Image (cartoon, grey):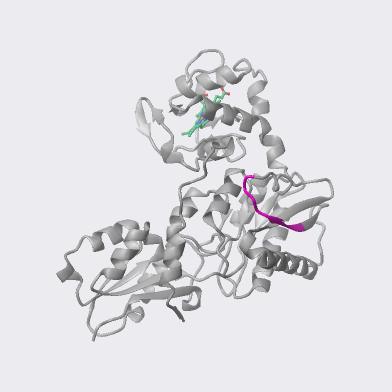
Amino acid sequence: MRHCLLVVSLFGVLASIGPAIGGESGSAIFRGMRASDRAATIAGVPQTGLRCSGCHGRDASGAVAGSAVIPPVDGRTLREPAPTRPAYDPALFARALRDGLRSDGRPLALAMPRYGLEEAQIDALWLFLSQLEADERRGVEAGRVRFAVAAQPGNREEAEALRLSLERAWRALGSPDVNGRRAEFVSILADPASRAFDDVFAVLGSEPGTAFGTGLLDALVAQGIPVVGPAHLPSRDRERLPDVVWLTPGESALADFISRNAGTLRDAGDRVERHATSARDLAAILALPEADLAGTSLIVSIFAVKTPSDLERLAEAPAETLLVRPAPPFASRDELADLLASLVRDGLAESGRDLTRTRFLEAVDRSTVGIRGRSAGGGDGPMSSDDVDLIRLRPARR
Ligand code: HEC
């Protein structure tokens, strides 16, 4: 079991969660990266978290949900007349979102929320939907598909080393032509504002040990670029960044681990033990009077910690406190590259010849790659104590 005293760097991780990106892209609005900001209502009742992509699909291709049909809303479909309605233009699109009227003026079903979006946001959405088809195939050509490692000024060499390791891992898989395409790996110095990633299908990985800044992740995901494989970040980021495939287990696996192992995690004795596997558990514990906490053991999942001040208050609590978080599922750069290469191969194979970012993301999300007895691809596989880092915030007083 790895015991790490990483409190300082952990504070760093939490403190680096800055505000989300500045200018909003249509992609970020459509995929609800800041869903709580959106003024959506259903039958006049304010709603939060209603991302367009949640109903219409990440690629706006629509869905059938029980008896309800959710129509496709990609730009090409909207601009074409359909048997049930005339074509949309930007003004009719804006009216549909704000007033809930179809292009022929009839009201849309209540299930389609009404959105109090600003004009610039609606313009950005329309532009995004118009370019969506091309966007979905960025970096894809007849005979190749391009993946990038994102370098930052501080980790250029490591990014290049990861790229070389990816090439090695790809060769080890026999350099497959998957559905007629070979994979190409480039490393790009990430100036998120630049258009450097325009010809990239997806971004792979982050280097073990280097901080993959949330600012960079935000910028990539806001541009609609899938990211596969950054190291662990708190769950807040997982919810906020829907197009990121994490390679560490999720909340339920960690909660399960804690409930199975709590007895052996604490320092012993007949101390009262409390677990927090959710933010609500943690809030309840932090609300207890000091006297109730003294002499107890707190075992807290990293997923329960939502803000830096939660962590500060935990560190000050008069209890033995253990923070449990998933360890990265790789021990070395080569191991990470091997995992990423097989995720890429399987994801491409499952997406078929008609490759799109959405199909690829869905395929990678589903795939599980055995690594040290654990599933990857954001899975919730079984965990052993090798799979977690334990951070002792405050040792037991004896
Ligand atoms: C809770 C699910 C839900 C969410 C969230 C949602 N929609 Fe819809 N949307 C629907 C349904 C259902 C319809 C079909 C309504 C009908 O046919 O009467 C629809 C219809 C539409 C239409 C009209 C399509 C047509 O063919 O007439 C447009 C345009 C649209 N949605 C865009 C959006 C955008 C943009 C967002 C995000 C800002 C969004 N929707 C969010 C469920 C949703």
Answer whether residue 189 is magenta in the image.
Answer: yes
Q: Is residue 389 above or below residue 303?
A: below
* Relative image position of residue 101 (x, y in whole percent): 49, 18
The answer to which image quadrant residue 124 occupies is: top right
Question: Position of 278 compared to 364: left or right?
Answer: left
Question: Position of 45 compared to 80: left or right?
Answer: left
Residue 205 appears in view? no
Question: Position of 103 compared to 269: left or right?
Answer: right
Q: Which residues are magenta?
A: 185-193
- Quadrant of the frame with the C terminus: bottom left
* Relative image position of residue 313 (x, y in whole percent): 29, 64
Answer whether residue 253 is magenta in the image.
Answer: no
Question: Position of 244 compared to 107: left or right?
Answer: right
In front: 281, or 234?
Answer: 234
* Relative image position of residue 241 (x, y in whole percent): 52, 49
Residue lying at 35% horizontally and 81% vertically, measured from the top left: 264
Q: How many marks?
A: 0
* Relative image position of residue 180 (x, y in whole percent): 83, 52
Q: Which residue is most to the top?
A: 105
Q: Is residue 96 above or below residue 291?
A: above
